[in-house]
């Protein structure tokens, strides 16, 4: 059974909070902006765009926004699988720890 992007997003955000106590922001009413901003202590926020597994497409506005954010140095990831999402969140935490020298 294929999961909807919202169920993948919810599972990832619950896992991030449970495992790391991370705070995230759901982005509403801002066309083109990624779905979530993951606030990682000591690091830069990671932007997460959730897509329907195997069939999610980016709009031209999303492509422009994601390119701008990447060019500004932000990490922006497209996620269509809960396991991959957990991997990306773990990488964000690891990067922040490395920056803090922990």
Image (cartoon, rainbow, N blue to C red):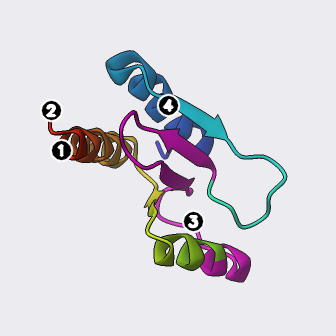
For the magenta stretch, what is the residue range? 35-64
**Which residue, given by chain and number where applicable, does mark 3 sit on?**
56
State the image coordinates of residue 23 (x, y, percent, origin top left): 52, 28
**Which residue, given by chain and number where applicable, does mark 2 sit on?**
102
Quick one: label 4 or label 3, which is nearer the N terminus?
A: 4
Which residue is painted at 39% across and 33% down in the image? 41
Q: Is residue 49 magenta?
A: yes
State the image coordinates of residue 7 (x, y, percent, origin top left): 56, 35
The numbered mark at residue 64 is: none
Alpha carbon of mark 4 to alpha carbon of mark 2: how far? 24 Å
Q: Secondary structure at mark 3?
A: loop
Alpha carbon of mark 4 to alpha carbon of mark 3: how far? 19 Å
Of marks 1 and 4, the one in the foreground: 1
State the image coordinates of residue 10 (x, y, percent, origin top left): 55, 31
Quick one: label 1 or label 4, which is nearer the N terminus?
A: 4
Of marks 3 and 2, the one in the foreground: 2
Vertical position of residue 28 compared to residue 71: above or below: above
The reply to whether discs 1 and 3 touch (Cβ–Cβ < 8 Å) is: no
The numbered mark at residue 13 is: 4
Alpha carbon of mark 1 to alpha carbon of mark 3: how far? 32 Å
Q: Secondary structure at mark 2?
A: loop
């Amino acid at each position: 059974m294929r999961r909807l992007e919202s169920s993948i997003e919810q599972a990832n955000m619950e896992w991030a909070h449970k495992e790391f106590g991370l705070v995230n922001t759901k982005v509403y009413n801002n066309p083109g902006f990624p779905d979530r901003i993951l606030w990682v202590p000591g690091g830069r926020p990671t932007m997460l765009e959730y897509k329907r597994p195997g069939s999610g497409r980016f709009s031209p506005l999303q492509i422009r926004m994601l390119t701008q954010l990447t060019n500004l140095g932000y990490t922006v990831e497209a996620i269509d699988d809960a396991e991959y999402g957990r991997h990306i969140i773990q990488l964000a935490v690891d990067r922040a720890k490395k920056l803090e020298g922990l």
